[in-house]
């Protein structure tokens, strides 16, 4: 009798331990991440955030692939993730179009695709599970609204005289370049005297931002404002403006997007006027979404990042607490 009780007791203990172990050690997931490259401070911070978040959770194994700004490398990487039968794919799309077939292949293989940062075109969005990141249209609108307030406060814009703006666009066909242009244009509609006199891509890099700004300055004596789709291009353009003997932030008002450290330093130095925040710290959010997915939860179709605006009035105070 006593022996029988011992056996039952042992059995209960083993079952209980087993379920504790099941809670403590979730099934390991292998996740493939197709990143676009390392074109900016923003991108570097984004990659580090994702890698750190995965390192912090040993129940995930991350396979990282850097496409070096080439769409075909991304397509190859996603195909190799499918061949390896990963549990999920994290994906940042270099440009919006051209990924339909490979996303269909992932879907056919039953592998969920979670987008981070840059989305694909609307007609392909049914092929991926969700997207987390920033509202790039809103960022463009915030840049336009900040500019309107600033020009008015400085007494530069009376609503009648033309305001000449040059634009440095991001990578052609990418979601942030398309949407930041659209957002800014939405605000321009309320200011019929604003005009974009020149607009060209600087590919989100400092070197190209500088080269394009040099060409703008050579061709044009009357540039009042620069709107750059990211800080990196604005920082390159600041060099070009200085080399042309002008004062960035004074002779040419500059507003850009991201809020990276380099932009804060430039604002504190009075050379950049404003930067609209776009957070690259997406890693923890991405890992949490994958945990939820593994636990069988349904993910929301869109996970937004919350962001602010910085200019020369608040940049110095915020600088010490910036994480990227
Ligand atoms: O603004 C830029 C980067 O996709 C939001 O890409 C991102 C953009 C970011 O290179 O700096």
Image: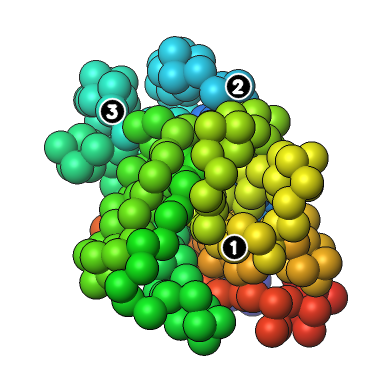
Task: Tell which circle, 1 or 2, labels the residue nearer the N-terminal end.
Answer: 2
Where is residue 178 drawn, in percent x and y? Answer: 33, 44
Give the residue at the far left of this rendering.
Answer: 123
Name the residue tied to disc 3. 97
**Mark 3 packing: few (<14 Cα in 10 Å), some, or many (20+)?**
some
In-front residue for pair 286/268: 268
**Mark 2 packing: few (<14 Cα in 10 Å), some, or many (20+)?**
some
Q: Is residue 153 visible?
A: yes
Name the residue located 64 percent from the left edge and 75 percent from the top edge: 311
On-image quarter of the N terminus: bottom right
Name the residue located 29 percent from the left edge and 47 percent from the top edge: 129
Name the residue tied to disc 1. 253
In-front residue for pair 152/210: 152
In the rendered image, which quarter is residue 287 located in? bottom right
Position of 269 compared to 183: left or right?
Answer: right
Q: Is residue 291 visible?
A: no
Q: Secondary structure at mark 3?
A: loop
Name the residue located 47 percent from the left edge and 71 percent from the top edge: 147
Q: Secondary structure at mark 1?
A: strand
- Distance between the Cα atoms at labels 2 and 3? 17 Å
Q: Is residue 284 above or below residue 6?
A: above
Name the residue tied to disc 2. 68
């Amino acid at each position: 009798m006593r022996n029988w009780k011992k056996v039952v007791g042992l059995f209960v203990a083993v079952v209980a331990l087993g379920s504790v172990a099941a809670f403590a050690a979730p099934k390991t997931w292998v996740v493939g991440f197709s990143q676009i490259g390392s074109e900016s401070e923003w991108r570097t911070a984004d990659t580090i955030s994702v890698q750190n978040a995965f390192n912090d959770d040993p129940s995930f194994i991350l396979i990282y692939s850097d496409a070096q700004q080439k769409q075909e490398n991304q397509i190859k990487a996603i195909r190799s993730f499918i061949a390896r039968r990963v549990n999920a794919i994290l994906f940042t799309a270099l440009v919006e179009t051209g990924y339909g077939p490979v996303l269909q292949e992932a879907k056919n293989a039953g592998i969920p695709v979670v987008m981070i940062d840059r989305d694909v075109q609307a007609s392909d969005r049914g092929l991926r599970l969700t997207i987390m990141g920033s509202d790039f249209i809103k960022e463009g609108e915030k840049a336009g609204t900040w500019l309107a307030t600033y020009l008015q406060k400085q007494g530069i814009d009376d609503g009648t005289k033309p305001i000449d703006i040059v634009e440095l666009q991001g990578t052609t066909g990418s979601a942030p370049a398309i949407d930041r242009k659209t957002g800014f244009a939405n605000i321009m509609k309320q200011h019929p005297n604003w005009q974009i006199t020149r607009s060209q891509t600087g590919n989100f890099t400092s070197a190209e931002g500088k080269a394009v700004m040099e060409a703008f300055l050579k061709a044009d004596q009357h540039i009042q404002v620069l709107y750059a789709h990211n800080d990196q291009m604005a920082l390159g353009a600041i060099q070009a403006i200085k080399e042309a003997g002008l004062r960035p932030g004074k002779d040419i008002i500059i507003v850009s997007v991201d809020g990276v450290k380099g932009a804060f330093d430039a604002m504190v130095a009075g050379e950049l006027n404003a930067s609209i925040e776009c957070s690259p710290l997406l890693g923890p959010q991405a890992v949490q979404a994958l945990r939820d997915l593994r636990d069988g939860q349904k993910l929301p179709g869109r996970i937004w990042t919350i962001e602010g605006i910085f200019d020369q009035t608040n940049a110095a105070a915020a600088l010490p607490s910036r994480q990227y």
